[in-house]
Each structure stands twice: as structure tokens, then as C-alpha cells.
Amino acid sequence: MNESPGVVDLLGVLAYAELSAFARMTEDAASLAPSLADQAALSELAVAEYAHFRLLHDRLTELGADPERAMSPFVEALDAWHTQTAPADWLQALVKAYVGVGIALDFYREAASHLEPSIAKLVDEVLVDEGRSEFVVERVRAGVAADPALSGRLALWARRLVGEALSQGQQVAAARPELALLVVGSAAEDQTQISRLFAKLTEEHGKRMAALGL
Amino acid sequence: MNESPGVVDLLGVLAYAELSAFARMTEDAASLAPSLADQAALSELAVAEYAHFRLLHDRLTELGADPERAMSPFVEALDAWHTQTAPADWLQALVKAYVGVGIALDFYREAASHLEPSIAKLVDEVLVDEGRSEFVVERVRAGVAADPALSGRLALWARRLVGEALSQGQQVAAARPELALLVVGSAAEDQTQISRLFAKLTEEHGKRMAALGL
């Protein structure tokens, strides 16, 4: 295995992020969707996450890594995020899916800019699915139009989602310096670089909130 | 729409069977799997169920039917089956997946023998995935080898799974005579034909139990 030391970590954290997103979205779709059509729409998004998981899993195997071992250091942080952000209703579930997928795609994009071509290609394959969660925008906007009081409540919810994500992310970065290094692409001043990355993720999040009308 | 009157019912019941199996297997995988590799293996099976759901959904749309309306008469019976058969542990979840997928495939096969070619083709596409659940056989056999006392308990569990399925199936058949007619392929003596079909499903189930070593 001739990869940078953080590559297995990077593929591992993304793989478990996708696997856990798949499971939680599927569960939210089954338990919170107001109709079978809505359940199917969110399930469709969940299955796309599973396809990303499979790409990452296969890439790990090709690199000679054990996918399970690569994922396990990140199970606790990602499970904690999901536990802290269990949606209470359908619109919260949709906002969570949109915000979660959005942060993950930002993270892929950021990581891709510092990576060897073989991984960058995988990132391209994942980014093809950008736009899949656009149905969420339409449904959240319709929900808020029908009940404008929801807007503030969902905006608060979205802030909580991203806040908990950054908090878990900071802990992961501190525990896995090689991963952090790989994602921010700089050996020196990595805390500053991490702060810069987080600022960028926050900025992209703001754009997504605007798209949702929140 | 020039199809037999039961065709939309048939596609509808199969579509919801696949969508609900997808959701429950994914949930069982996330909550009961003893390792990430096991979670991924059962999730893989769940995603294959989702692909079948999509085929059935698209076929319904092509026929000019509303997939949601086609599925809704069967939600109660299938949800009741899942509620009555919520697995308590990982081996129960595996046996449920194997038995459930097996019964569904028997049902596809049986229905296909009485259907117009366009539906038979869809059934062929679904049956390509036969064999996917073979990993279950290996894991259940290993589990029973490690603890032979599990054998009787799992055999009882499997009987309950199939018993509850036949009971729900009988109610559905009584409520939807055109569907029953289509599946058994006979206008006369349909109660006898339904009994014959159920006897056949029970026989196939017995073969699956033998494969599992139960």
C-alpha cells in the first residue's frame, strides 16, 4: 500500500458516514414519511448513499485495507451525531438529509483537491449524485409556505445539525492528525487550516439554508 | 390499461412487500448486526429489495397506475406481519430475511406462470437476485454449529414467520379476489387453488429450513 497514511482513514470515515446515513435515512423514511411516495423518495436518496458506501468499501479492499477496521475508529463520533440529531418529524428528517448529504459532499470536494488521482476519481463518481437531494428543497419550501411558523424552528434545527457535526468533526480531527492533514492538505499550522475548512463548510451550509428558504 | 384486473394489485402488493422488506432489513442490520461487515452484508440484501421495488414501481407507472394507490391496500397486512415478527437478535433477523425473501420469490415464480409476458419479464429480472441471500445460510449454520441449542429455537421462529405470513396472505386473498385469481390462475374453485398454492409455499419453506440446517 503506497498511499498517504491518512487515505485509509479518509475512506474509512466516509464509508461509515455513508453506511450510517443510509441506515438512518431509511429508518426516518419508514417511520416519519407522511405518504408512501415520500417514503420512496427519501429511501431513494438513502440507497444512493449506500452506493457510495460500496464504492468506498471496494476502494479500501483494492488498497489492501480491511474496510471494517478502517471504519471502526469513526463509528462512535458518527453514531453520536445521529443520536444527538434524531429527527422528531418529517421536515426535520428532510432537512437533516439535505444538510448531511451537503456537508458530506463539501468534505469529498475539499478532500479531492489534495488527493492522488485514484481517489479523486472516486470522489467524482460520488459527486455525480449531487442534485439528488433537490426534491428536499421543494418539499421543505412547500412545508414552510403552508406553515410559516416552521421556518424559525427548522432554521434552529439546521444550526444544531451543523453545530453537532463540527463538534464531532473537531474531535475526530484531534484524534486522527494524519486524516486532518490529508483533508486540509497542509502540514504546517493545521489547526488554522482546520478552522479554515470548518469556516468554508459553514459558509456552504449557509447557502444550503438559503436554498431551503430558512 | 389492458391488463387483467388483478395485475395492478399484484404489482402493488409486491411493491410494498419489497419497500417494507428494504426498510426492515436495513433497520435490523443497523440495530442487530454484531459487526460492520455483517451490517453491510444484510444492507446489501436490503438494497437489492429496493431495486425490485423500483422495477415494480416503474412498471406500475408505465401501466398508467398510481404506485402509491396500488400499494396502499396492502400496507396494513404487511406492516402487521413485520410487527408480529420483529427479530429479537441477529440470527432471528437473518432467518427472517432468508424466509421472507424466499417466500417472495416463490410468489413471483407462481404468479409469473399465469401472467402476460411483460410481467413475466419483470419477474425474471427479480429472480436474477435469487442466491443473494445465500450468505445467510452460511452464517446461520455457523451460529447453530457454535451453539446447537439455537437450532430448535430458530426452527420455531421460522415456523412463526411462515405461519404469520400465511395468515396475512389468507386475509389479503379474501379481501382481493381478483388478485387471488391472478396468482392461482383459475376462476373455478379458487379456495382450493389458494390452499394448493399455500401448500406449495409451505413445501418450499421446508426446503429452505433444511438448507439452513433447521
Image (spheres, coloured by chain):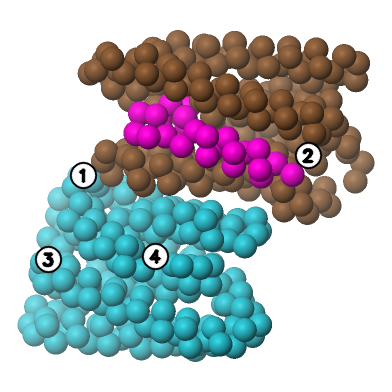
Chain colours: A cyan, B brown
Measured in 3D between alpha carbons, the distance from the residue under mark 4 to the one under mark 3, in whole angstroms, is 26 Å
Q: Secondary structure at mark 1?
A: loop
Magenta-highlighted residues: B73-98
Q: Which residue is mark 4?
A: A86
Q: Which mark is residue A66?
A: 1
Relative to the observer, which residue lies in front, B85 or B211?
B85
Q: Amino acid at mark 3?
A: Arg
Residue at the image position 65 percent from the left and 25 percent from the top: B167
Measured in 3D between alpha carbons, the distance from the residue under mark 2 to the one under mark 3, in whole angstroms, is 54 Å
- Please name the predominant secondary structure of the magenta segment in the image: helix
Image coords of residue A174 (percent x, y):
11, 72
Q: Are marks 2 and 3 on the same chain?
A: no
Q: Secondary structure at mark 4?
A: loop
Chain of the residue displaying label 1: A
Is A160 inside the magenta-drawn segment?
A: no
Image coords of residue A23 (percent x, y):
41, 53
Q: Which mark is residue B106?
A: none
Q: Which mark is residue A176?
A: 3
Is B76 inside the magenta-drawn segment?
A: yes
